[in-house]
Image (cartoon, rainbow, N blue to C red):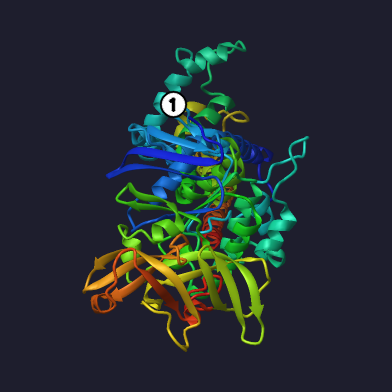
């Protein structure tokens, strides 16, 4: 029953007045975002995974390791190789930053496996070198949270759990920490469960998503699949967007534009710098995607991609959310386009029809769709 | 200070010895008890807390009376005393220590319990997620963070033991050189109209009490700052 390279979590029970019945599996790599309205049980699920909360009917398996099983197996929290970053940093006030960082680090090197994540690496990754001898009392909120992340990493976890690590921070501090989290995801091959109610964070960080409503899992799967599933509230939301990760194919320094290759086409995206061959993630916002039947003539819109209509879904105030598959054959990535019913009728669109999806490059640039830069700052 | 009887310092030494031994023992007993009271969800928890606090409101004579019976030849104290061939724990220094521990217990348990309760679950949860066993979390996180509470408890326990009179008189018998401590010595000096001697000891107690209360508020202040 145990699956390698997968994380399986099933929790059923009542905690106080809250009834939880959540089950999902997700790959044991990359960032899995737990998303849902407040009070949907995200934190409870995370606490169950950590063993901080116990429901009698629960299963928790991490990459073949059983942390909780229906046979009564229940590892206490301190025996689970996990890292937990709380909403508030929760540093030990009586210890220096250095001793906080080292608190969970395996002690002694009695022949054990060498640390996968070293002290120097963490200190450098999180930029806390200058803080090491200070007391947590004298740190800013953002510094504290960075130390808390470092402390969790140095305990050599096999799974990192993060419960809204940025929600207690102001926007500026948030934008300082997000790049650290991205580096973390890209540099360490460590599965991360990430709770947030901020879609922008998900678009930037998550590879997979678990959608929770009232203690139930509504959907779970790769982020882009859930984002472009018109039966889910995400695609119908006013700010619906699909995250695409592509490979940088070329960079035009003169215009500051890079070409990003995806399954089904290429996007031209503004960027201040780029390395050919690197991966980059963009968010394509449904409102920024327009459709045309014929390839347009001379236009300021740089991105015109042949695509096929997968489905059209009426949403409120007479608008449509149209799911389109990139590529003339319609076999590429799915993105969303939000149209008025009038446009839909005028173009005589239909499911399966060939169209040209148009996206202004600036809509994908820093501060807008490109999630690797701070959005809206 | 001339013409003071040389034996006036004997009760002072005995008092300090009694208070030091009692405080040390109190910390050993009260800390785990306070931890349990702060963390347990047992339904009878508050009943235990009430039993511990009982000595705060009972007249010392009542406590002393029951202690006398318990320590005496027919009580558990007598059984223990028989281990080294004695008849009773009453009227001994050992008996005073036991009496002081029981009568000062609430003054030590309460601040330590409050300090543990003020920690909340979070530091311990954080420790558990960092592979700290419950024992390691207690020693390296809970205890250091609650240290102002332990300090308050120790100071209060020491002070209350020094100030105990009724219980001591009931179970100690005021035997010079053995069970006569400052509070009972003052009583004796007054009874025999040795005003000057009584004054020296009583004045010393006033200064001591002042120092205790002052240090308590300084600890509180440090505690408040540490929490900020």
Task: Report whether B49 appears left or right of B3.
Answer: left
Question: Is residue B179 shown left or right of residue A242?
Answer: right
Side (left or right) of B47 relative to A66: left
Out of B59 and B149, give the one closest to the viewer. Answer: B149
Extreme residue toward the left, this view: A317
Callout 1: chain: A
User: In front: A60, or B162?
Assistant: A60
Residue A57: x, y in percent? 37, 32
Q: Residue at x 46, y 49 (%)?
A: B120
How many numbered discs sit on the rendered protein? 1
**Is B67 located above or below residue B14 in the figure?**
above
Q: Is residue A333 above or below residue A54?
A: below
Residue A4 visible in the snapshot? yes
Using the image, determine if residue A362 lies above or below residue B13.
below
The residue wearing badge 1 is: A72
Q: Position of residue B167 (x, y in %)?
A: 45, 33
Give x and y (percent) for residue B142. 55, 45
In this picture, residue B208 sits left or right of residue A1: right
In this rendering, the answer to whether B4 lies above or below A76 is below
Name the residue at 55% across, 77% down. Answer: A269
Q: Residues within 10 Å of mark 1 (few under 14, many from 20)?
A: few
Residue B96 image point, x, y percent:
54, 29
Give SS at disc 1. loop
Residue displayed at 21% across by 73% down:
A318
> At 57% across and 68% down in the image, what residue appears?
A261
Between B21 and A70, the one nearer to me in the picture: A70
**Whether residue A52 is visible:** no
């Amino acid at each position: 029953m145990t699956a390698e390279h997968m994380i399986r979590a099933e929790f059923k029970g009542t905690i106080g007045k809250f009834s939880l019945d959540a089950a999902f599996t997700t790959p044991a790599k990359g960032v899995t975002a737990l998303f849902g309205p407040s009070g949907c049980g995200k934190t409870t699920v995370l606490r169950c995974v950590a063993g901080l909360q116990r429901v009698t009917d629960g299963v928790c398996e991490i990459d073949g390791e059983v942390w909780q099983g229906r046979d009564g197996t229940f590892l206490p929290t301190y025996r689970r190789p996990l890292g937990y970053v709380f909403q508030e940093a929760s540093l030990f006030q009586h210890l220096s930053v250095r001793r906080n960082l080292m608190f969970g680090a395996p002690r002694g090197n009695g022949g054990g496996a060498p640390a996968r994540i070293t002290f120097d690496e963490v200190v450098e990754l999180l930029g806390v070198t200058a803080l090491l001898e200070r007391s947590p009392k004298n740190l800013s909120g953002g510094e504290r949270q960075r130390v808390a992340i470092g402390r969790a990493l140095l305990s050599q976890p096999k799974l990192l759990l993060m419960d809204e690590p940025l929600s207690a921070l102001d926007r500026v501090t948030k934008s300082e920490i997000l790049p650290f989290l991205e580096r973390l995801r890209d540099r360490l091959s460590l599965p991360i469960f990430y709770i947030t109610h901020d879609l922008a964070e998900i678009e930037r960080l998550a590879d997979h998503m678990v959608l929770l409503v009232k203690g139930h899992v509504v959907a779970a799967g790769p982020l882009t699949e859930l984002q472009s599933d018109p039966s889910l509230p995400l695609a119908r939301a006013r700010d619906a967007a699909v995250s695409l990760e592509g490979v940088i194919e070329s960079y035009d320094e003169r215009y500051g534009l890079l070409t990003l290759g995806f399954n089904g086409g290429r996007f031209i995206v503004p960027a201040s710098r780029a390395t050919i061959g690197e991966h980059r993630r963009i968010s394509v916002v449904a409102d920024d995607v327009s459709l045309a039947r014929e390839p347009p003539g001379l236009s300021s819109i740089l991105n015109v991609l042949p695509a096929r209509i997968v489905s059209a879904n009426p949403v409120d105030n007479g608008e449509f959310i149209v799911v389109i598959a990139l590529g003339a054959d319609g076999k590429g990535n799915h993105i969303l386009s939000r149209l008025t019913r009038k446009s839909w009728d005028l173009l005589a669109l239909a499911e399966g029809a060939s169209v040209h999806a148009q996206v202004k490059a600036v809509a994908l640039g820093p501060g807008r769709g490109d999630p690797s830069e701070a959005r809206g700052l | 200070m001339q013409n003071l009887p040389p034996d006036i310092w004997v009760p002072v030494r005995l008092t300090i010895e009694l208070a030091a031994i009692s405080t040390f023992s109190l910390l050993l007993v009260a800390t785990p008890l306070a931890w349990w009271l702060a963390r347990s969800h047992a339904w009878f928890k508050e009943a235990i807390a009430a039993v511990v606090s009982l000595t705060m409101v009972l007249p010392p004579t009542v406590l002393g009376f029951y202690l006398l019976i318990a320590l005496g030849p027919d009580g558990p104290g007598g059984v223990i005393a028989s281990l080294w061939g004695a008849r009773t724990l009453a009227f001994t220094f050992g008996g005073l220590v036991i009496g002081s521990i029981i009568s000062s217990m609430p003054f030590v348990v309460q601040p330590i319990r409050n300090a543990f309760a003020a920690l909340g679950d979070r530091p311990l949860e954080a420790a558990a997620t960092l592979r700290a066993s419950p024992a390691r979390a207690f020693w390296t996180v809970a205890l250091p963070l609650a240290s102002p509470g332990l300090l308050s408890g120790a100071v209060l326990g020491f002070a209350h033991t020094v100030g105990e009179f009724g219980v001591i008189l009931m179970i100690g018998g005021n035997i010079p050189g053995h069970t006569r401590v400052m509070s009972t010595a003052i009583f004796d000096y007054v009874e025999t109209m040795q005003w000057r001697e009584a004054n020296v000891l009583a004045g010393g107690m006033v200064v001591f009490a002042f120092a205790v209360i002052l240090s308590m508020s300084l600890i509180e202040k440090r505690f408040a700052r540490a929490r900020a």
